[in-house]
Image (cartoon, rainbow, N blue to C red):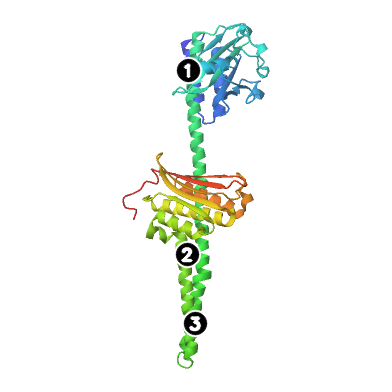
Amino acid sequence: MHSIEAENRLLRRAIEAITSSVDLDAVLRASVDLVTEATGGDVCFLHLWDEEGQCLVLRAASAGFEEAVGRVRLRLEEGVAGWVAAHRDIVVIPEDKWADPRYKYIPELRGELFTSLLSVPIVSPTGGLIGVFNVHSRRAHAFSEQDVGFLRLTASLVAGAIEHTSLFARLAEKERALEDLMRRTIEAQEEERRRVATEIHDGVTQQLVSVWYRLQAARRAVRSAPERAERELATAQGLVDEALEDARVAIHDLRPTVLDDLGLVPSLRALALRQLEGEVELELDLEEGLVLPPHHEVALYRITQEAVNNVRKHAEARRVRVSLRGEEGDEVVLVVEDDGRGFERGATEKAGPRVSFGLQGMAERAALAGGVLTVDSAPGKGTRLEVRIPRQLAGASEDRR
């Protein structure tokens, strides 16, 4: 039995080991070593609950059992650890564990080498199952209340550490995803700037240069050859009209003016009718009165524009449905679905590079609006595209202008 001073030293070491790292594997290994020392056992096995697989998985073990880590899996009620996990209760077997009906021999853990067993559940502060500590000793060992108490306290610390490292890992993952999204957004913005600059240079600028030369020619000919001057002016007028149209298109690409003029729902209706009416059987289910922040309107409009364009060019569909609704679950939901040829899920490149790139762009637009895009498709089964934006992010303001 440890003295109070020795127990306190072990407890301080346990706290330091468990709280000094955000590396979960390092925390688990340190916990196994400390538990073995504190309880007077010979080996310790730490099983964690795998929610997805609905089983316990060996995640840390004393030296000599490293190869078993990740390989040993136990269902609830399977073996002593499975029983402890199912009942959230402690099991102490001082000797003759083979006679206990809960015991199961696991070759990887070489149970024939050990006589006594102490098993303690690891439970989160909210009552959720985290895992199980198993301590084994070669000789018969009556684990004391002090041993059990230390192991229960260590289990509580490990539960908190696991939640802490899991939260840290999720936060780090979200930060990486945000950084990646920001990088792609900046790249997309730069690409958009280059595209608009190229369009202005190749379109509007060249047309204005041509207008200048035509006006100079008309000026020289206005007295000596008035008919030629008139032709030059007519040509210049045509070039000005083209320049105005190119400028209008470039401006529309940056923010569709129809959104400012009509609002989101009428704009989506006009877009769908313009692109698809007469080509497919078109169903529109657009909730009137939805008023969203301007950048959310642009995102939903552009996603619909890209989706409808993909349908028209690639889907070979007979029926298309476009829906925009506010749902009770505090979400605004956009759906574009068709009965066309579809494509393999997870292999959008088979639908063509234009579709693959378009889907990525739509997903990024949805993410920037705080939403999520999902695509459900299969060859010959059509395609269903859905965007969900949380209502609190897309909440209507009384005056969006």
Q: Which residue is rendered at x = 33% and y = 49% of the image?
A: 397
Q: Residues within 10 Å of mark 3 (few under 14, many from 20)?
A: many
Q: Is residue 138 left or right of residue 218?
A: right
Q: CA distance from mark 1 to mark 2?
A: 66 Å
Asked whether the beta carbons under mark 2 and mark 3 sit within 8 Å of each other, the answer is no
Q: Mark 2 is on which residue type?
A: Ala
Q: Mark 1 is on which residue type?
A: Leu
Question: Considering only vertical position in the picture, is 209 above or below 378?
Answer: below
Task: Say if residue 19 shows up in the picture.
Answer: no
Question: Considering only vertical position in the picture, is 372 above or below 161?
Answer: below
Q: Which residue is mark 3?
A: 214
Q: Residues within 10 Å of mark 1 (few under 14, many from 20)?
A: some
Q: Which residue is rendered at x = 50% and y = 54% of the image?
A: 282
Element assignment for label 2: helix
Q: Quadrant of the C terminus?
A: bottom left
Q: Nearer the viewer, mark 1 or mark 2?
A: 2
From the viewer's side, name the closer residue of 131 and 333: 333
Q: Which residue is mark 1?
A: 153
Q: Which mark is residue 250?
A: 2
Q: CA distance from mark 3 to mark 1?
A: 89 Å
Question: Considering only vertical position in the picture, is 245 above or below 17?
Answer: below
Asked whether the beta carbons under mark 3 and mark 1 sit within 8 Å of each other, the answer is no
